Amino acid sequence: MTAHFIAIAGNIGVGKSTLTRLLSQELGWTPFYEAVDDNPYLPDFYADMRRWSFHSQIFFLGRRLRHHRQLVNHPTPAIQDRSVYEDAEIFARNLYTQGQMDARDYAAYRELYTAIIDFLPPPRLIVYLRASLETLTARVQRRGREYEQAIPPDYLARLNDLYEEWISAYQLSPVLVIQTDWLDVVENPEHRGLVVEVVRDALAAAGENGKIPPHHPSIP
C-alpha cells in the first residue's frame, strides 16, 4: 500500500487541481487528477441538469473508484484530486435534493456507491480546501471553462453548505482544513511553502496518532 495516499477535497473552483499539481511537484508524489475535461456528459449536464445528472455522476463515480483503487495499490506516494466520497455525499445528494435527479436514479446510484465503498481503504489524509462563495465564483470565471460559466451562484452556495456538513461528520481519516480565500499558491512562494509545510505536518501527525486539528494558517 502506498505510504502517502491523500485526497484533496473542496468545491468547484476552490483550487484542488492547482494544489494537487503543486504538491506533486514539491513532494515528488504521483497526481491523479479529476476527470473533468474528458467527461463526455459534462457540457450536456450543465445545459440540462435533470436529464443528464445520473449519466454524469455515474461517469465521475466510475472514474473516481478506479483512481481510488489505483491509489491504494500505488507503490509511491500519491495525491487524488477530489475524493470518491464527494461525488456521492455532495454532488449526487445535491442533485437529488434539488429535484435534478429522480428518486429511482438516486437510489440506484447510492446502492452502487455503498456496495463498493466498504471495500476501499480510506486515504491517509483529506486536505479540505474551504472558500467563500465570492472567491469560488471569481475563480470559476477566471479559469474560463465555457460549460462552467452558466453555473448559478446558488448552486455553488448549496455545494458549500453540503461540503461543510460532510467534512464535519467525516471520520474515516484525518482532515486538514485550509482556508483558501487569501491564498495564492501559484504566484506567492510564501503561500506555497506554507501549504506544503502544513500538509507535511498533518501527515506526520496522522502517522503518530491518526488525529490532527484543523489548520487555519494565516499570513498578513
Image (cartoon, rainbow, N blue to C red):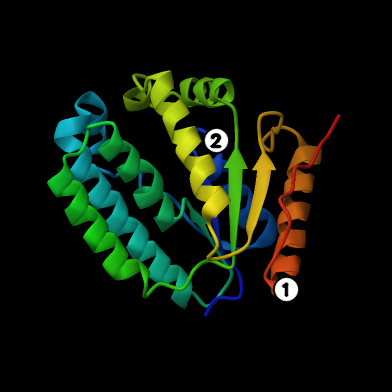
* Mark 2 residue type: Val
Task: Give SS at disc 2.
Answer: loop
**On-image quarter of the C terminus:** top right
Callout in the foreground (2, 1): 1
Say if residue 12 shows up in the picture. Answer: no
Q: Residues within 10 Å of mark 1 (few under 14, many from 20)?
A: few
Residue plotted at (34% across, 63% down): 65
Task: Give SS at disc 1.
Answer: helix
Q: State the image quarter where residue 113 is shown.
A: bottom left
Q: State the image quarter where residue 100 is shown.
A: top left
Say if residue 154 shows up in the picture. Answer: yes
Give above or below for 77 relative to 26.
below
The residues tagged by marks 2 and 1 sit, at their Cα atoms, a distance apart of 29 Å
Give above or below for 164 relative to 181.
below
Residue plotted at (24% across, 43% down): 56
Q: Which residue is under mark 2?
A: 14
Q: Which residue is under mark 1?
A: 209
Residue plotted at (75% across, 67% down): 205
Give above or below for 63 relative to 52.
below
As drawn, is 166 to the left or to the right of 50?
Answer: right
Q: Considering depth in this image, is 101 or 218 the residue closer to the camera?
A: 101
